[in-house]
Image (spheres, helix red, strand yellow):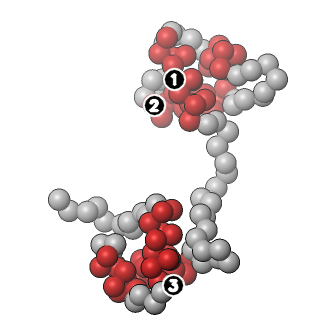
Amino acid sequence: MVRPFGKKTFTVDVRKSIVRGHEPGAHPKILATQFDCSSSQIYRILKNNRDDDGVVHRQSPGRPRTTSRDMDRNILRACREDPRRTSTDIHVSVTSPNDPGPSRRTIRRRLQVAGLHG
């Protein structure tokens, strides 16, 4: 099977082990063969994930999401229970009275991404 074109993403644990493997003096090309990737990826990980205590988990760019995965799941569940519910009804059922929660437009967007409303 051929790997799709593009960067191979590494988990935080793998990046930590790459940085720890480099500390005793292992050459990046040796680390590249161990982790089955190119040496340029190893160099990039060593450059981007250095900090005083080792590996830093970089935050992804962009605005933070207004809904969590649990909230998205509850939105989809409410729609599946009654597909003819409006986004306003779903908003009332999903959010608590003290919490503002997502907008109705966000609820419609989550349903559209899931393919439940178009």
Mark 2, residue position:
114
Mark 1, residue position:
76
Instruction: Farthest residue to the left: give it.
Output: 1
Q: Earlier in the sequence, mark 3 or mark 1?
A: 3
Residue type for callout 3: Glu
Q: Do we see residue 27 in this rendering? A: yes
Q: Confirm or deny contact between disc 1 and disc 2 (CB under 8 A).
A: yes
Name the residue at 31% across, 65% down: 5
Name the residue at 60% across, 64% down: 58
Picture quadrant where residue 108 is located: top right
Q: Is residue 89 above or below residue 114?
A: above
- Residue 99 lies left or right of residue 103; in this view the side is right
- Residue 105 lies left or right of residue 109; in this view the side is right
Instruction: Farthest residue to the front: give it.
Output: 24
Between the residue at mark 1 and the residue at mark 2, the CA separation in whole angstroms equals 8 Å
Name the residue at 65% across, 74% down: 53
Between the residue at mark 3 and the residue at mark 2, the CA separation in whole angstroms equals 45 Å
Name the residue at 56% across, 11% down: 85
Spot occupied by residue 24 in the image (x, y as percentages of width and height): 48, 86
Q: Nearer the viewer, residue 23 or 69?
A: 23
Q: Residues within 10 Å of mark 1 (few under 14, many from 20)?
A: some
